[in-house]
Image: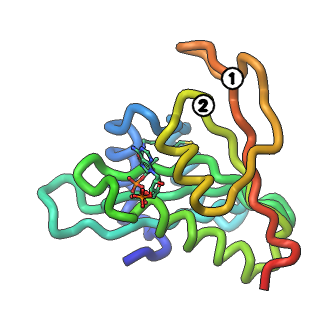
């Protein structure tokens, strides 16, 4: 089940973020401010994974920043044991469905050029590459591929 994160989910989200090498590593305050109504709006969805061993009580999460009518996926991560079971796709689809419901024009993201699983996931969810930022990432230096999903004509 995918649901809105609650403050009690933050330790599990942070633990997963830190334990997944390919995930973006955001500032912890970026997560804690999600629940601050005065902060820039972010949406954090989690996929429950409570049947698995502690401390991992979520199977995955997705974090997006809302900037007017554009949503930007900042992070998505699925626990190793939950991979290739459709969790990542469910998270992306739930997020884009939410964005569409809120009249967003597009959902955007950037991804390391070598991150084949994530690129395959976004492509399967209908995202299209519309740009590249040369040498954008460091450690190691790598291009960022820009992807977007237009929601303009979506029903
Ligand atoms: C990318 C990630 C979120 C995918 O999560 P997932 O739950 O395993 O993905 P799903 O099972 O929903 O896969 C959906 C589709 O994505 C593609 N895909 C996912 N993982 C893949 C892989 N390892 N190799 C190739 N294609 C892959 C496939 O098209 C797949 O559909 P299929 O299983 O019917 O072939 C996961 O691998 C992960 O957490 N990676 C580390 C963090 C990361 O890189 N985040 C992205 C930062 S931009």
39 or 41: nearer the viewer? 41
In what quadrant of the picture does the C terminus appear? Answer: bottom right
Name the residue: 62% across, 47% down.
74
Name the residue: 65% across, 60% down.
42
The response on whether ligand 1 sits within 8 Å of label 2 is yes
Mark-to-mark CA distance, 1 and 2: 6 Å
**Other residues around mark 1 within 10 Å, as few (<14) / some (14–19) / many (≥20):** some
Of helix, strand and loop, which one carries label 2? strand
Residue tagged by mark 2? 112
Residue 11 visible: no
The answer to whether 146 appears left or right of 79 in the picture is: right
The answer to whether 22 appears left or right of 69 in the picture is: left
Name the residue: 69% across, 47% down.
109
Point out the tag, 1 or 2, that comes first from the N-terminus.
2
133 is higher (above) or lower (below) than 106: above
In what quadrant of the picture does the N terminus appear? Answer: bottom left
Residue 150 spot, x, y in % from top left: 81, 64
Residue 91 spot, x, y in % from top left: 49, 65
105 is higher (above) or lower (below) than 139: below
Circle count: 2
Residue 116 spot, x, y in % from top left: 51, 37
Q: Quadrant of residue 92?
A: bottom right
Of helix, strand and loop, which one carries label 1? strand
13 is higher (above) or lower (below) than 125: above
Q: Residue furthest left?
A: 53
Circle on res. 143: 1
Residues at discs 1 and 2 in contact (Cβ within 8 Å): yes
Name the residue: 53% across, 53% down.
121
């Amino acid at each position: 089940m995918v649901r809105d994160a609650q403050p009690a989910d933050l330790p599990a989200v942070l633990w997963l973020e830190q334990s997944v090498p390919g995930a973006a590593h955001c500032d912890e305050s970026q997560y804690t401010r999600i629940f601050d109504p005065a902060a820039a709006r972010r949406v954090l969805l989690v996929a429950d994974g409570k049947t698995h061993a502690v401390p991992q009580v979520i199977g995955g999460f997705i974090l997006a920043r809302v900037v007017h009518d554009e949503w930007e996926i900042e992070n998505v991560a699925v626990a190793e044991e939950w991979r290739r079971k459709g969790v990542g796709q469910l998270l992306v689809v739930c997020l884009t469905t939410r964005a569409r419901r809120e009249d967003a024009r597009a959902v955007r993201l950037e991804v390391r050029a070598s991150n084949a699983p994530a690129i395959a996931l976004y492509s399967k969810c209908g995202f299209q590459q519309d740009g590249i930022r040369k040498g954008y990432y460091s450690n190691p230096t790598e291009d960022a591929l820009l992807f977007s999903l237009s929601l303009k004509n979506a029903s």
